[in-house]
Amino acid sequence: MAILLRESEVEKLATMKMAIEAVEQAFRLQGEQKADIAPRRRCRVDQGMLHVMSASLPVLGYAG
């Protein structure tokens, strides 16, 4: 099930230090080829554009 969080909710759950550590870990796992990153996709509509960017870290059980 997807969990949608507002920026104000994220600020209550995570510090900048936690975010930096998570990004560093994700890049490390990507370097070890343990991340799955799909190419960015764009879908145009009259009112704008939808950008779809997905990735997963299976060893951590995360996808987004």
Image: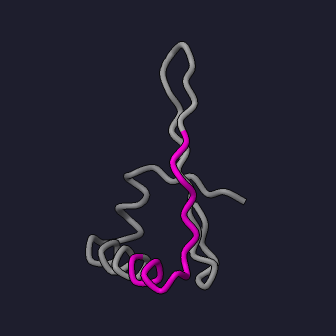
Image position of 22 (left or right of 62): left
Q: Residue furthest right?
A: 1
Figure check: 1 above or below 57: above
Image position of 41 (left or right of 27): right
Image position of 20 (left or right of 10): left
Part of the protein shown in magenta? 27-41
* Tag count: 0
Q: Identify the residue at horizontal 52%, vertical 81% (top origin).
A: 33
How far from the left and from the top, in percent, is residue 6? 45, 49
Q: Identify the residue at horizontal 41%, vertical 69% (top origin).
A: 13
Q: Quadrant of residue 62?
A: bottom right
Image position of 49 (left or right of 60): left
Figure check: 51 above or below 55: above
Figure check: 61 above or below 41: below
Q: Identify the residue at horizontal 57%, vertical 19% (top origin).
A: 45
Q: Residue furthest left?
A: 17
Q: Nearer the viewer, residue 35 or 4?
A: 35
How far from the left and from the top, in percent, is residue 53? 52, 50
Q: Quadrant of residue 36?
A: bottom right
Image quadrant containing the C terminus: bottom right
Q: Identify the residue at horizontal 61%, vertical 66% (top origin).
A: 63
How far from the left and from the top, in percent, is residue 41? 55, 42
Is 34 included in the stretch rendered in magenta?
Answer: yes
Q: How is the image coloured?
A: one colour
Is 29 included in the stretch rendered in magenta?
Answer: yes
Q: Quadrant of residue 3?
A: bottom right
